[in-house]
Amino acid sequence: MKSEKMLMMNIIGNISDMDNVISDIVEKNYVQIVDSNDLISHSEFLFPINDENVNMAVDFNYIRKYKSDINTREEENKLNKINDYLEFDLAKSKGKSLKSYNKNEIQGFYEIILENTDKLQEIDNKISEKNELVNLYSKFKNLNIKIEDLYNMNNFKYRFGIFGKDDRIKLKKNYENIFAAIFHLSSMEEGEVYLILYPTDMEVDINRTLRSLNFQEIFLPKEYLGTPVEIIEKLKNEKSDLISKKKNILKEIEKIKEKYSNELKSFLIEKYNKLNIENIKNNIAISDHYFYLAGWVGKTDSEELEKELKKKYKILIQFNDMDDHEGITPPTKLKNNVFFKPFELLVKMYGTPNYEELDPTPFFAITYMILFGAMFGDVGQGLIFVLGGFLLSKIKNKDFGGLIVRLGFSSVIFGFLYGSFFGLETVIPALLIRPYENINTILVMAIVMGIMLLIMSYGLGIYNLRRENNLEELYFGEKGITGFILYLLILSLALNLALSFKIMPIQLNGVLIGLCLLLMVFKRPLANKLQKNENLYNGEPVSGYYIEGSFSIIETLLSIFSGTVSFIRVGAFAINHVGLFLAFTTIGNMIGTKTGNIAMIIVGNILIMGLEGLIVFIQSLRLEYYEMFSKYYKGDGIDFIPSKNKF
């Protein structure tokens, strides 16, 4: 399926309507506003000139980039700070009908809350400071003298600090050589805390000695006086006063919140959305009288948007097809139905489809469900996935929950085909095959399924190359027609040699394979010849081209073999699924009691659903990404991200 056809929308309107027009556009949620200044500078802002809009065309000569007078980052930080204290979940309020309010009144409350949040931040900083000081003075609480007495000494100086464990031993050994009084005050993780008193005349020698012992000095603030215990008590009282002030401010904020909760939510949402519009306006060009807006919009939405905007505003609106404009790549807007949409999550993990290639989501969804179900076929466990996915989609993530639901149904379908119900193969009959009893058959079926999926992948790849008009890869590339024929010829040869299933003589088969390889080696000069391009190698050194081409042939042959054999894991995991459960039932039988047997069945199912379910999820994804996407999907597109309100 092709992604949505995208058009470049150009709007010119009166500058007085700019905010309202942008607000209406982002409310619609289906326009990706882009930088109109960039389009104008490259002469890509297109609109027709006639008698009605000649003034707009004249004003176009005086165009400039819009510059906001508002510091949006600073304003948003204020809003975030207020909302952190109010603890509103504005995302849940989005779209709800909140009652109207007196803007001036709520603006006043907003200013009060903003002022109080500044006070609260200041109080929190002071509380942190008091805590740090309490921790600091706690190191000296064994000191029973007033700190100011140390400050006021005339002929002596003091130092507080820490010695490491090893340095303390060195200190003890050299007490008699140090002309100072040394007092051990406390122990801590970093080391031992000491007070050192020494004559002022010995300062140079003492400093040298302390440096040699890696002394880490601690500096005390001089505004606190008294003994360390008295200072700690004072700090705790100051901290208590700050906590009391904080509680009073929070009570005041809580009163306003209780009385005006809905009004404040509406006010904050409006403020956030206005800031969002202000940020969007950075992409707008303006003149003295007009604004110039550009954005991508889906073709299906363009008519409705034009009708609504023209009904409300006097504007010029033009939709342009930019497909043929070099240097401009439209974003990709996927348009999958409800069933396939959850699988976009996994497709976009690999990359967004480029605008020209086929959206792989429907094909990916169908094949991924088949691969997952084939490897994890179980009715009971599949139903658990369905239930879990349904709850997840309602509580947390709609798309991922929907994905799990669909994989669960696939598991249920294959569970009926395999006759497996919570790992037990005696509850329901197998409609198709029991993997554990038909190991060779299930492995062959897996390879056959892989071949069919790869053939379809080649077909999609050829279609995409045709859309891109890439003749070199289309006709002669390893993912194009020649590569596809080579794959079929190698399959034919393998059937002939392994199963004696003769489609054509081996000699002819070998000649055709060789011809395909030659075509792939000479693909560039052949394609340029077809297009009558005299530069056969596009300026690339001839020797380098053929060396690279030879190695790519080896890689292509290896990938054909490994890619096909890779699908054997589908059968292997189908067998493994049964084998794992048999291991748990065997352990249950060894326990020898009915309770132990049931317990092991439950434990086995939980582990299989959790561990093997995750492994199968990853292995299915690996087959899609590495074996199939590599044949037909680039994923180098630009995702369509509509400009929208924050809330």
Image: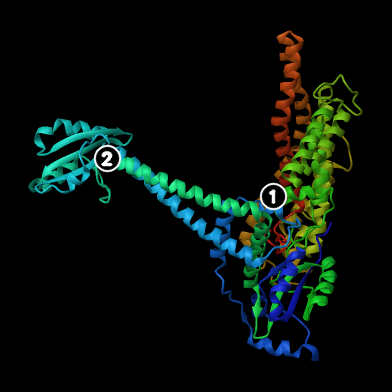
| Residue 112 rendering spot, x and y as whole percentages | 55, 60
Could you tell me which residue is drawn at 64 percent across and 86 percent down? 288
| Residue 14 rendering spot, x and y as whole percentages | 72, 82
Between 153 and 300, the one lying in front of the other is 153
Could you tell me which residue is drawn at 22 percent across and 44 percent down? 147
| Residue 532 rendering spot, x and y as whole percentages | 77, 72
502 sits left or right of 269 in the view: right
Residue farthest toward the top in the current orientation of the protein? 592
Could you tell me which residue is drawn at 82 percent across and 21 percent down? 424
Q: Is residue 557 visible?
A: no
Quadrant holding the C terminus: bottom right
Label 1 packing within 10 angstroms: few (<14), some (14-19), many (20+):
few
- Disc 1 is placed on an element classified as helix
What residue type is disc 1 on? Met
Label 2 packing within 10 angstroms: few (<14), some (14-19), many (20+):
many
Tag on residue 280? none
- Disc 2 is placed on an element classified as helix
Q: Which residue is mark 1?
A: 349
What residue type is disc 2 on? Pro
Between 243 and 316, the one lying in front of the other is 243
Q: Is residue 576 visible?
A: yes
Q: In which quadrant of the rendered view does residue 328 lie?
A: bottom right
Q: Which residue is mark 2?
A: 228
> Between marks 1 and 2, how big is the CA–CA gap?
60 Å
Quadrant holding the N terminus: bottom right
Between 639 and 505, the one lying in front of the other is 639
